[in-house]
Amino acid sequence: MKKAEQLEDFYKKTSHWMPDNLKKELGHFNVFRLEEHLVPNTDCLPYSRRDFYKVSLITGPTKFYYADKSVEFEKSALIFANPQIPYSWESKAEKATGFFCIFSESFLDNLAHIKEYPVFKPGDPPVFILSDQQLEDISKIYQKMLVEINSEFTYKYDLLRNLLMELIYSALKMTPATSSRYNGSTASVRVASVFTELLERQFPIESPNQKMKFRSPVEFAKQLSIHVNHLNRSLKEITGKTTSQLIEERLIQEARALLMHSDWTITQIAWCLGFEELPHFINYFKKNANLTPRAFRKLQNV
C-alpha cells in the first residue's frame, strides 16, 4: 500500500528547498502559484492521498476526481482536499493556472476545528465553481497570501490564518458543484481503492494511545458518503470479499503483530483496535486465530 504523501515529500518533489522550520514550527502553512509547481510535461496530479490539507484555485477546463466521484468545470473552481480522501485532477487546457496553499491540521488548532467545516468533511462535495467576480475575489486572497508569506511581518502567520479562514468562509457561502459517480466496474475500483486507503491509514498502530477510528462497514460507508450495500457490492465485485471480511482480516493482522512485537497488555491492544470490552476482543481473536490472544502470544515466545 502506497503511503500518504507527507509535507517533506511534497517539498522534495516540487521544490529545490525545504523550510528550515518545517518540523519545528507549530503547524505548517505555505502558498504557491499552481503553474510553478506542476510536474514537468503534465498538467495532472496522480490519484493519491496526502497527510496535509490543500486548498486550490484552478483556472481552465479541468476534471477533478475524488473518492468514486468526479466534477468537471470549464472556467475556474476552488477545491478543498483533506487527508482522508484520495484525489486527482487533469487539466484539459494547454496550461493550468491558479494558486494553492497547503497546511497541517495544527496550523489552525487555536482558531478553528477544521474537520467540522463541511468543505473538509469526506462526504461533502469539495469543489466550488466560481463566477468571474468570485474568481477575482479569491485570486486577491491568494495574492495577499503570497505577499505575506514572503514578508518580515512578525505576525504574518496570524494574518495568513485569517486569510485561510477567509477562503473557507467564502466557500461556505457558495453552492458546491454537482458531482457524478463513475459507472460500472470503474466505480467499484474507485470505491475499493478509497476504502482500502481509509482502512490502511489507521495502521500500523504505534502507540498504546492510538485508536482505530473506523471499524464497522457502516462507519466506512459514511466516510465515503455511500450506502453500506453499495460499499459491500463494490468490494465483493473487486475483491471477492465483504466489507466485514476485509476489515476483520486487517484487524486480526494488526492484532497478531502487536501481540508478537509489543509488550503492551492485551487490554491495551484491545482498546487500540476499537474494542471497549476485553472479552469481546478475546472472542473475536479466537474466532479468527483459533487461539486466545494470550495463548497466541505465549506460543510466539516459545
Image: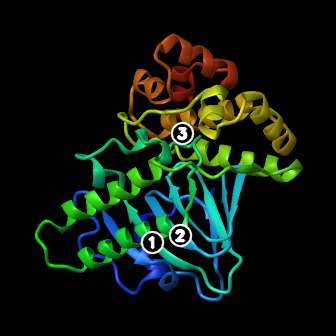
Which residue is located at x 49 percent, y 52 percent? Answer: 82
Q: Quadrant of residue 6?
A: bottom left
Q: Residues within 10 Å of mark 3 (few under 14, many from 20)?
A: some
Which residue is located at x 46 percent, y 17 percent? Answer: 276
Instruction: Name the amino acid type tagged 1.
Output: Glu
Which residue is located at x 27 percent, y 64 percent? Answer: 23
Q: Is residue 24 visible?
A: no
Q: Quadrant of residue 195?
A: top right
Q: Position of residue 294 (x, y in %)?
A: 51, 21
Nearer to us of marks 1 and 3 is: 1
Instruction: Name the amino acid type tagged 3.
Output: Ala
249 w.r.t. 153: above or below? above
Give the secondary structure at mark 1. Answer: helix
Q: Look at mark 1 in the image and give the residue it sits on.
A: 136
Find out whether the residues at labels 1 and 2 contact each other: C-beta distance under 8 Å: yes
Q: CA distance from mark 1 to mark 3?
A: 53 Å
Q: Position of residue 227 (x, y in %)?
A: 72, 30
Q: CA distance from mark 1 to mark 2?
A: 6 Å
Q: Position of residue 284 (x, y in %)?
A: 62, 19
Q: 253 and 213: which one is in front? A: 213
Q: 202 and 99: which one is in front? A: 99
Q: Look at mark 2 in the image and give the residue it sits on.
A: 132
272 w.r.t. 155: above or below? above
Label placed on residue 257:
3
Residue found at the far front of this picture: 133
Q: Say which label, 2 or 3, has the lower sequence index.
A: 2
Q: Quadrant of residue 154?
A: bottom left
Q: Say which label, 1 or 3, has the lower sequence index.
A: 1
